[in-house]
Image: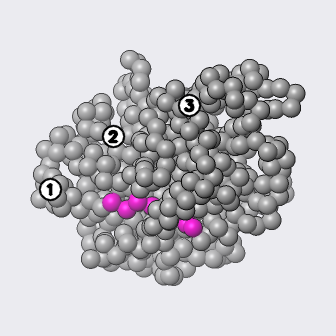
Amino acid sequence: MADQTTARILVASNRGPVSFSTAADGSLSLRRGGGGLVSGLSAIDDPNAVWVCAALGEADRAAARRSPDGRLDRAGFEVGGQAVRMLDLDPEVFDRAYNGVANSTLWFLHHMLYATPTSPAFDRRAGEQWAGFRAYNAAFAEALAAEAAPGAAVLVQDYHLTLVPELLRELRPDLRIGYFLHIPWAPADYFRLLPDDRAAAVLTGVLGADRAGFHTRRWAEAFADCCEQVLGATVDRADLSVTHRGRTTRLGVHALGADGEFLRERAHRPDVDQRLAALRQQVGDRRTIVRVDRTELSKNIVRGLQAYRHLLRTRPEWHDRVVHVAFAYPSRQDLAEYREYTAEVRRISEEINAEFGTARWQPLILQVEDDFARSLAAYRLADVALVNPIRDGMNLVAKEVPVVSDAGCALVLSREAGAWPELAEDAIGINPYDVLGTADALHRALGMPVAERTERTKRLAAAATALPPQQWFLDQLAELSA
Ligand code: G6P
């Protein structure tokens, strides 16, 4: 485990690679997280690497308090790998930063989810939340500054930590700082709905980095447009760089791919086989349309269900011949918008089964308990995968399904997903707002000949794994060192 101020590589993210829960006997048990960042980090072979993250619940906090300086040695928990430093933040500061600014403001802004005349509201409460967001970002910057060896490389992740690069540079000008955004960046006209001071703070926060990375050129260019229009910064579009107050930040495009090797192995373990057998029994010889998401507003689950309902209403030939398997896992339930959206997903699902279900056919299977093995089983089984986000930084489901699919799967994909440009040639593209268009795409996908599906899936899988997480991470590290 790294000593204080000797870390040569540091990663910072809100959600860390491990989380804790409290067992019945009061003991803490550790769970390793998944996702691209965790697999990417597995590429680092450096005992002096440290991952700084927030303690997200009571059990995390208890674990952080138990370890000296909040530093957890993953090896000590028999997981192996780098040291993790979990920040035990004031719960009110955390709530204001995570629920208030990160998930209610920045997430809504970059996914363009504000659609009513009364939201967002930048009132006194929003002012308090912003102060919490600043304090939360400052706590990360201070922890990183305390851990980093001279000249170390620091990779700051995502919209929660927007202010960290600038704050960290003030504390430690010797560090090489990279920033990566995993979500889309809003177009300049939309971005300007933030109050002027906050819009500027978000941009100069990121510009504190030497390099700022995005999943697609589209998001990188939107960021550059905002810097130009809001800050009056100089943008070099050929070089993809932004110069502001005499410093230049280079923008990079790194389209995170699926971890093919891990997924193929994981998808054939006995727990997945078991769930696949159970799903097969439920579905019978019918076709399946599969979707797997967090129950997230930007994932557009409600319009996806409306499209399926429209398909069944207008194309009775599919009655009793198709089942829609929708996995919608709980997310951000502290926010009223998410609770309401979850209720809406349940309501429309019940309506669909009530309208079309028969004694022998349940047209829709909605599951809300998170189960990774069952998701993989559904990926293997799917005839059609529906991925229809309003906007999405990347969307790894679109990349994972073709890798895991047993017999080829037609992919219906939103043109607003970051994954779209890489998968466009072999996916069926949709405008995510167009419910009738989505229903047509589902019909086309269900009718796609198996031979064509198989060929397309092979090409999709190759495109989806072009930049595996480990390489994605190493590329950014190399650029930062150059
Ligand atoms: C997105 C964000 C991640 C976040 C994840 C889950 O992918 O880019 O930073 O961790 O959603 O959201 P949560 O709020 O549960 O961490």
Q: Nearer the viewer, residue 120 or 432?
A: 432
Distance (Cα) linking label 1 and label 2: 19 Å
Mark number, residue 258: none
Quadrant in which residue 356 is drawn: top right
Distance (Cα) linking label 1 and label 3: 42 Å
Report x, y in % for residue 385.
60, 46
Distance (Cα) linking label 3 and label 2: 28 Å
Question: Mark 3, mark 2: which one is toward the viewer?
Answer: 3
The relative height of residue 245 versus residue 201 in the rendered view (above or below) is: below
Quadrant in which residue 20 is drawn: bottom right
Report x, y in % for residue 129.
43, 36
The relative height of residue 148 versus residue 447 in the rendered view (above or below) is: below
Location of mark 2 (residue): 186
Is the Cβ of the residue at disc 3 closer than 8 Å to that at disc 2? no
Crowding at mark 3 (Cα within 10 Å: few <14, some 14-19, many 20+)? many
Mark 1 or mark 3: which comes first in sequence? 1
Q: Which residues are magenta?
A: 253-260
Residue closest to the far top: 117
Q: Nearer the viewer, residue 109 or 334?
A: 109
Q: Element at badge 3?
A: helix
Magenta span main SS:
loop
What residue type is disc 1 on? Asp
Is the Cβ of the residue at disc 1 closer than 8 Å to that at disc 2? no
What residue type is disc 2 on? Ala
Location of mark 1 (residue): 236
Residue at 63%, 61% in the rendered image: 404
Location of mark 3 (residue): 439
Q: Element at badge 2?
A: loop
Residue at 70%, 63% in the rendered image: 267
Report x, y in % for residue 190.
30, 33
